[in-house]
Amino acid sequence: MENTLGLLFFLFTLLFCIFSFLLFLSRMKPWCNCHTCRTYTTMSWTTHFTNLSDWYTHLLRNSATGTIHIHVLGNIVTSNPINVEYMLKTRFQNYPKGKPFSAILGDLLGHGIFNVDGSAWMFQRKMASLELGSVAVRTYALQIVTEEIRTRLLPLMVSSVACDQQDQDSVMDLQDILRRFSFDNICKFSFGVDPGCLQPSLPVSPFAAAFDTASKLSAERAMTSSPITWKIKRLLNIGSEKKLKQAIKIINNLAEELINKRRKIGFSTRKDLLSRFMSSVENDNKYLRDIIVSFLLAGRDTVAAALTGFFFLLSKNPSVEVLIREELDRILDNPVQECASFEQLQRMHYLTAAIYESMRLFPPVQFDSKFAQEDDVLPDGTFVPMGTRVTYHPYAMGRMERVWGSDCLKFKPERWLHDGVFVPEDPFKYPVFQAGVRICLGKELAVVEMKSLVATLIRQFDIRVVGSDTEPRFAPGLTATMRGGLSVRVYERSGRWNDP
């Protein structure tokens, strides 16, 4: 009798699982045979487009509403600023990160600020807001950036010039240098630790390497037509999920070591963000670990991605570089001054406009997704069923004529200036830093870091992208990373524009 009941229970459980799986598949519509879904699943878009983001831009440009539906992904994608404002402000409560998104990034980000909603998000945001908004923290951050520029970045660029003079074929991967620069800065600012990634030998940081791998593989989860694929691989510990698990183990071990060391030496008098959070969060290493990873993602990859896009565009637009240098010469009247002060950086309106303009065309985060908690209708008339993923696409928005005008593809900092003064655009038209309730708290710190680096390098060097006539190819990741890096040649100020 017991065996019979056991068998019946097993069969019932099996049938229930099969039914649930089929129900899930019916909602995902993996067999959708519309042209868009067929193009996505067969990857035939690669015939005409270099990047997936460019294909999305094409679809959105040809949509009457600026909104499309990728059925196989259960994903509504929009480039319509009115929809963006509706999602991020008007009906913010209906469009949280959501459990599907949290599951995709949960192994990497845990319960960090970028992967949670509700009270957990509110607590971390309140803490971060209090710290990042203070004058003391802003001053501390600029000191770290200035020191990294003077003691490491400038000597490295000078040595690259010397190498170029000896070997005309010598090139530098500027993207790698910028990632090392921003990783050193964010680690010192957030955790009080110097990984030394920009030392002359350009050492490999296990932490940085593991973080790169985990970021890339976590992003690839979101690209699968069904989460069942990566969940099965994770269950069996095979393929990309095995590599992800190994990378996260390295991150966890190093984070644990960092937190324990900080507890031993004390944190009450230290200035870094980890110490400030440790004063409020007692003996919860897992929570602190999630905070560490979140700040790494925010402060390292985004800044490096934005700067990489900036130098790519600058190399193709020499007239913009000339105008930036004219502004720098007016403001930095001391010819031997290496780095600008905070007050001087604030006066650099054209440089600010150029950086914002470069992020319009090459945003560090190309798209961001939310999940509808209940049925809804977007302002453009698009019906959103409960549980649907809804994505706004800053990369595509920056290339929309209906949003930015007929010259939307032109790198034109002047569009941000009114009588020579920088004036920001509507954040829902330019959601590079998100917008509404979740707008980026570190925006001003990031812009100051970028301006400080650009002002120093442009004043002393000509940085020329090798092969700038080709469009960049992006690798999968949570932020925009150029596949193969950004190869450049570095010259002392000489005015040469063409590769030798």
Image: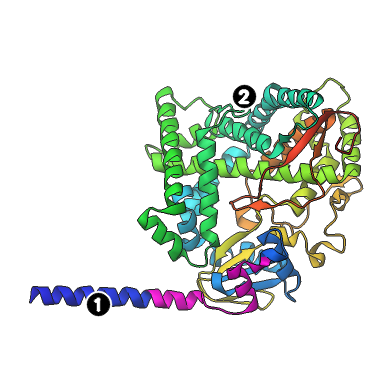
Q: Which amino acid type corresponds to the residue marked 2 in the rendered image?
A: Ser
Q: Residue drawn at (84%, 30%), measured in percent from left and top?
A: 459
Q: Main secondary structure of the magenta part?
A: helix
- Name the foreground residue: 215 vs 352: 215
Q: Are marks 1 and 2 in contact (CB under 8 Å)?
A: no
Crowding around mark 2 (Cα neighbors within 10 Å: few <14, some 14 to 19, many 20+) is: few
Residue 53 seen in the current view: yes
368 part of magenta stretch? no
Quadrant in the rendering for residue 335: top right
Q: Position of residue 381 (x, y in %)?
A: 67, 78
Q: Residue drawn at (66%, 61%), measured in percent from left and top?
A: 52
Q: Quadrant of the C terminus?
A: top right
Q: Nearer the viewer, mark 1 or mark 2?
A: 2
Answer with left or right where residue 318 lies relative to residue 105.
Answer: right
Question: Who comes first in sequence, dot 1 or dot 2?
Answer: 1
Q: Residue drawn at (34%, 75%), measured in percent from left and top?
A: 18
108 lies above or below 58: above
Q: Position of residue 61 (x, y in %)?
A: 76, 69
Q: Position of residue 22 (x, y in %)?
A: 40, 77
Q: Which amino acid type corresponds to the residue marked 1 in the rendered image?
A: Phe
Q: Secondary structure at mark 1?
A: helix
Q: Which residue is mark 1?
A: 12
| Circle number at residue 353 | none
Q: What residue span does the magenta drawing correspond to?
A: 21-45
Q: Which residue is mark 2?
A: 201
- Name the foreground residue: 304 vs 162: 162
- Name the foreground residue: 419 vs 288: 288
